[in-house]
Structure formats: structure tokens, C-alpha cells
Amino acid sequence: MRQNICDAALAIFRRHGFAAVSMRAVAQELGVSTMSTYNYFASKDELFLEVRSRLFRQLSDYLSARAVSEDAEERLEQVCRAYISYGLTHGPEYELLFNAWQFDDYREVVGRFGPERLRDARPWDVMVDCVSGYLTSTASDADPARTAHLVWAQMHGLLALHHAHKLVFGVNVQQLLQDSIPGIFRLVGSDAAR
Amino acid sequence: MRQNICDAALAIFRRHGFAAVSMRAVAQELGVSTMSTYNYFASKDELFLEVRSRLFRQLSDYLSARAVSEDAEERLEQVCRAYISYGLTHGPEYELLFNAWQFDDYREVVGRFGPERLRDARPWDVMVDCVSGYLTSTASDADPARTAHLVWAQMHGLLALHHAHKLVFGVNVQQLLQDSIPGIFRLVGSDAAR
């Protein structure tokens, strides 16, 4: 039932956005009473945290299933292509995970649950692992966490600008995403953050 | 009066977000009748477009005033530092300009006014000019527009993740922003997008 409630919340979010998700709307979607959903989640925020946590697990599995090469360079390319591909094909989910500005009450949610509960590090661990493996393979002494942030920012920047309809200067998003892979390898190159 | 109406709209947006901005709220803020604001703007969307256009001009002036070196490398660094600094110090304005996801009716607005009216290219022109000058100075044959997109994505990615409270993995945003300048020079380096 927790799974069903999360699925229903995500379906409503996809169709109508965060504001439309309420315990009542979720109950209606499932054809059950609002009270019964409260047996599983104390509030919309609790429900939202669980949906978010499930999506992080989904993204983590998505990356792990695709970043499989034993060659460190190939694996870094695989994880980057997988992240970009997830961001393109799972627009609403990506938005929910990484564009928190949309939530009027985000600061309040952070305050109530604390940053710890809002941090789900699994996809990040996969990313750092791939970056770290690549740096080791190239005998680079760059800092893996700092370098991984630059890689993440590069991919997130393109995805966020794309989803916000900001890529309007005559360069195709597909072209930019192609450029971004060699760009990432320049970013993590011999002079990377240390 | 148009200026005053735009200032009032921006003040409300800063305090309470986009949803709180209405012709009525703007009139109240200014102590005038709602009808009189309609003499200047036909709708909230028209008003929003003008605010947005003024902010693009502000950002453009901000970049131009800071990217002044006659040395192409120094000028590229100046424009990047200026963009990042604007993004950090003008959070709500940056959000309004570049994070359109927040607007429930954004697609509808785009549909009504057309992408042309939503495209205000001046800050972009400054950015491309700096990137292009640098590429020329290094005798690179990389494409200026495509390379400038990668630079923009790198900066936007960090700013967006920062504003969305996603930089929670133990690396300070100031450190990342410092890393991002040499990162950008690697991005636009000898193998840049062509």
C-alpha cells in the first residue's frame, strides 16, 4: 500500500505539479478514504520524502546498471551518458529530485526534517566512484569529490537549461549533450580540481 | 509609472514568489487603484515579460561593466566571475530569469507570446563575445556558440544546485566556484567543441 500511495502521488505530480499533490487527491486517485492514507503517511511532506527517496534509489539503480565497464574511462563516460539520459527521459522525476526551487515550502521542509533526511547519497556515491576511478587510472591527484561536483554541475546545467526552455540560441540540445561528454573529459583532465 | 509598477512587482516576487504577484497586489503595494495599473500593462503576463526584460538588461549591464580587460583570457575570467557573482548576490532575480520551471503557466506564456519575445539575448551576446575573443586569441577553431553553452551550463549548474540546496556533500560552494574558473578554462581549452 505504501508503494501504491507513492505511485499515485508521483502520477499526480507528473500531471499537475507539486501543489496538486495532497493526501486527499492521492486517496481519490486510489479510490480509498483520505483517512486510510494517513495510516501510512502522517502528512504530505512525509509522503513527499518517501517518493523522493524512492526516486533517488531509481536513479541510483539506473546509473549502476549502465556504468558497468571495467575500463575507468569508459565507465565515466557510461555514468555521464546515463545521468543525462535519465534527466532527458524522466523530466518530472528529475525536476522533483534536483530543482527544489519549485517548492514554496522547501526551506520549511528542510527545517522540519533536517538536511540529513533530505540527503540521499546513493546516486552521488556512484558518480564519485566513477570519477575517482578515472582519476586513479590517469594518475591524477585531483580531489574526487570536488571534481565530481564540476562534472555534476556541467550535466545539471545543460539539463536544467533545457527543461527550463533556455536553450534558444540556435544550438540543438542533442548537439550540446554530445559536446558535453568530451567537455567533461576536459574538466576532469590533468589540471582538475585539487 | 511603468518603472514603479515593475519595481513593485519585483519586490512582491522577492518576498512571496511568483504566485503572489498580481495586478491587484502591485496596485496595493503602490497605493493606487488596480484599474490604473491596467493602463500600463494588459495582464500579469505582460508585466512579467517587462520585468524579465529589465532584469536581462540589468544582468547585461552587470556583465559588460565587469568584463573590461583588453586581454581576452582575463576578460573571459572577468565575465565568468561576474555571472557567478550576479547569480549568488541576486538569487530571486536569477531564479526569475533562468529557472522557469517554477511558473505553472510557463508553457502557456511561451505559447501566447512566442519564443521570440521571451528571448532577450543581450547577456548571451556578452558571453559569446568573451568566449569568441578567447578562442581567437588561442587560435582555436572551436565553435564559439557551442563552447559558450558549455561554459554557461557549468556556471548555471553550480548556481542552480546551490540555490536548490543540493550542494550537501561536504564541499563548500565557494570552493566549487573557485574550482569552476580553472574548470571553465579546461572546458574552452584546445579540444573545445567544434
Image: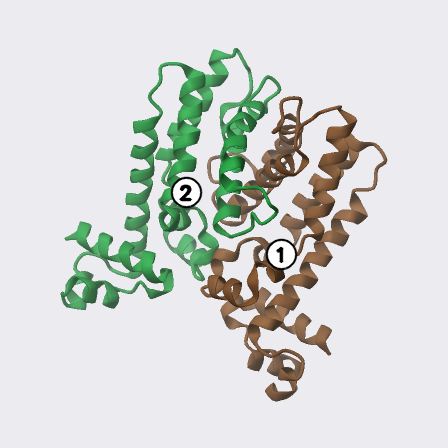
Chain colours: A brown, B green
Front-most of B73 and A18? B73
Q: Residue at x 31, y 34 (%)?
A: B62
Snapshot quadrant of residue A152: top right
Residue A41 in view of the camera: yes
Task: Answer with left or right where residue A23 lies relative to residue B105.
Answer: right
On what subunit does the disc labeled 1 rest?
A
Q: Residue at x 68, y 49 (%)?
A: A86
From mark 2 to mark 1, how far is it between C-alphas? 22 Å
What quarter of the picture does the C terminus of chain B occupy? top right
Task: Answer with left or right where residue A170 lies relative to residue A94.
Answer: left
Residue A27 lies, in percent from the top left, at 62, 82
Label 2 close to label 1 by CB (< 8 Å) = no
SS type, badge 1? loop
Residue B38 lies, in percent from the top left, at 20, 62
Task: Answer with left or right where residue A59 lies relative to residue A175.
Answer: right
What residue is disc 1 on?
A119
Task: Answer with left or right where residue A59 lies relative to residue B102.
Answer: right
Q: Residue flagged by tag 1: what amino acid is it?
A: Arg
Label drawn at residue B111: none
Front-most of A111 and A167? A111
Residue A77 in view of the camera: no
SS type, badge 2? helix
Front-most of A44 and B7? A44
Residue A134 lies, in percent from the top left, at 75, 31
Vertically, is A5 above or below B47?
below
What residue is disc 2 on?
B88
Residue A179 lies, in percent from the top left, at 62, 31
